[in-house]
Image (tube, helix red, strand yellow):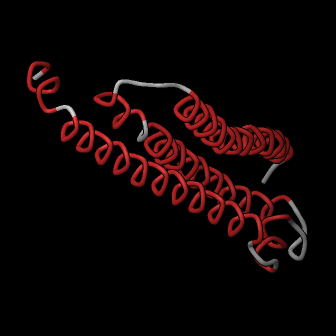
Amino acid sequence: MNKEEREFHFEEYKQLKIEILEVKRQAENMFKYSVVIAALVLTWLTTNTVDSSYVKIVWWIPTVTTVCCGLLGFMYYMRVRTFGEYIQKLEAELGHNELGWEKFLPTKKPIFKITYGLSWFLLLFFCLFVAMTSVQTVSEQDSHNKSIHPTANASAD
């Protein structure tokens, strides 16, 4: 590799590191958005009276948001892995055979990956649990109201 190619790849290496940081930031933001949306929707639902025909759908918003943001987060993770594979090639070509982040990283336990994945799973489980129990409670309340006031509900139908 001549000097110009080496300089080009070194600049490319630096740019990829910047892109990786941005992609990781976006993935972290997806998790934050999921938590914030779940908290806002669940807080709003527990403090407001909503027509029962709509509330069954609204309870599912945090779950759907968590799944969508989780998929985006996974996409970002896969993107970073692709960057990492290429950086490993650059490090092998530009650096010392024994040094380089991509050589060092596999020797460490994947704490970030495990913690991040577990956090997504727990948030999704929580949203699913809340949605399922809340929708069931609303359905039971609707059934109870129909049995108490059959004429009012018959005229409304």
Q: Nearer the viewer, residue 11 or 61?
A: 61
Which residue is most to the top?
155
Quadrant containing the C terminus is top left
In the depicted structure, whether residue 32 falls above or below residue 111:
above
From the viewer's perspective, is 157 left or right of 136? left
Residue 146 horizontal/vertical position (percent):
19, 37
From the viewer's perspective, is 97 left or right of 132? right
Give the residue at x 39% y 53%: 132
Give the residue at x 89% y 76%: 98
Residue 44 horizontal/vertical position (percent):
57, 29
Quadrant containing the N terminus is bottom right
Give the residue at x 51% y 60%: 125
Query: How many labels, in total?
Result: 0
Query: To which quarter of the image does residue 31 belong?
Result: top right
From the viewer's perspective, is 62 left or right of 39? left
Q: Nearer the viewer, residue 107 or 96?
A: 107
Residue 122 horizontal/vertical position (percent):
60, 61
Query: To which quarter of the image does residue 36 belong?
Result: top right
Residue 64 horizontal/vertical position (percent):
43, 42
Q: Nearer the viewer, residue 97 or 16?
A: 16
From the viewer's perspective, is 101 left or right of 52? right
Give the residue at x 9% y 19%: 155
